[in-house]
Image (spheres, grey):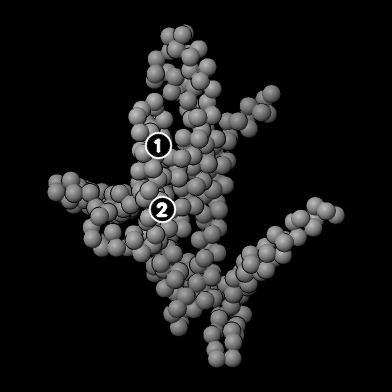
Amino acid sequence: MTGYLFILPWLIGFLLFMAYPIFYSLFMSFNKVYITASGIKTTFLEWENYKFAFLSDPHFVEELVMFLKSVVLLIPIVVVFSLIVALMINQPIKMKGFFRAIFFLPVIITSGEVVNELFAQGAATIPIIERYGIIDFLQANLSPTWGKPIVSVIEQLIIILWYSGVQILIFLAGLQKVNKQIYEAAAIDGASPWEIFWKITLPSIKPFILVNIIYTTVDLSTNSLNNVIVLIKENMFKVETGFGYATALSWIYFMVIFIILLLSIFFFTRKERLEFKKS
């Protein structure tokens, strides 16, 4: 009984501020929603909002596919970049804390408005790419199917790498959990730094890699640069679509992200599950 009393405030807060809004948004996604002076009125449409999203909306499917391609390209870039930086600043160097703060600082200062202003001032571009016409070369030689997402990734690369501060911290925590005696034993046995990285460091931080993949997926899908979220917001305030259609788009988007996370966990833990079954 005491335990239930302890969790009662959280339970009330969850039901009021999470469970009810989630259920209500699902309800709205099956309705045409009208905001009137006397309150919110709804008309039940069954699956019409969802059908319209896939069959009639000229932008949603295109932006969703674009997002999926960007995720496929960006997650490896962010995770590998974070791992490399974490390995570098985990070394016994002077001003280690200063360098860690430098890499984490953009996470603190880059709110939505700050990011928009940085974009407006051209801070997100890479000068060498523009100078040598690399984007024009990619657009001319790649098919639009992959050329557009690759160019989009390059154009946002600086900003996206700014968001790698949390992933770097997660990797740092993982690296500091590795027992140093294992490194000493490997060095005594004559293992090279490359062999130590692949056979000791990387397997030891494998759970942290999965955490960073999940975190990066959620971060990319919810940041202010995401065109799918912009599209959902635009539809929310259009007279012809409104809240009902916008919530339907949100639920489709949520399910896509949820499937991506499930697939990531499934494939990343597949080897461990097979070894567990064999044992």
Badge 1 marks a residue whose secondary structure is helix
| Label 1 environment density (alpha carbons within 10 Å; few <14, some 14–19, many ≥20) | few
Q: Quadrant of the C terminus?
A: top right
Residue type at mark 2: give it.
Answer: Ile
Q: Is residue 112 left or right of residue 134?
A: right
Q: State the residue at coordinates (41%, 56%).
A: 67
Q: Which residue is mark 2?
A: 108
Q: Compared to 263, does 247 lie above or below?
A: below
Q: Position of residue 215 (x, y in %)?
A: 50, 47
Q: Quadrant of the N terminus?
A: bottom right
Badge 2 marks a residue whose secondary structure is helix
Quadrant of the image occupied by residue 26 = bottom right
Residue 8: in sight, yes or no?
A: yes
| Label 2 environment density (alpha carbons within 10 Å; few <14, some 14–19, many ≥20) | few
Asked whether 118 or 276 is in front, the reply is 118
What is the distance, in whole Å, between disc 2 and disc 1 at their CAs?
16 Å
Q: Compared to 272, does 225 lie above or below?
A: below
Q: Which residue is mark 1?
A: 97
Q: How many marks?
A: 2
Q: Position of residue 261 (x, y in %)?
A: 54, 48
Seen as rendered, the residue at the extreme right is: 1
Residue type at mark 1: give it.
Answer: Gly
Q: Position of residue 3 (x, y in %)?
A: 80, 52
Q: Compared to 191, does 220 lie above or below?
A: below
Q: Position of residue 101 (x, y in %)?
A: 39, 43
Q: Compared to 275, does 221 lie above or below?
A: below
Q: State the residue at coordinates (37%, 55%).
A: 109
Residue 84: in sight, yes or no?
A: no
Quadrant of the image occupied by residue 148 = bottom left
Q: State the residue at coordinates (46%, 52%).
A: 219
N-terminal-most mark, 2 or 1 = 1
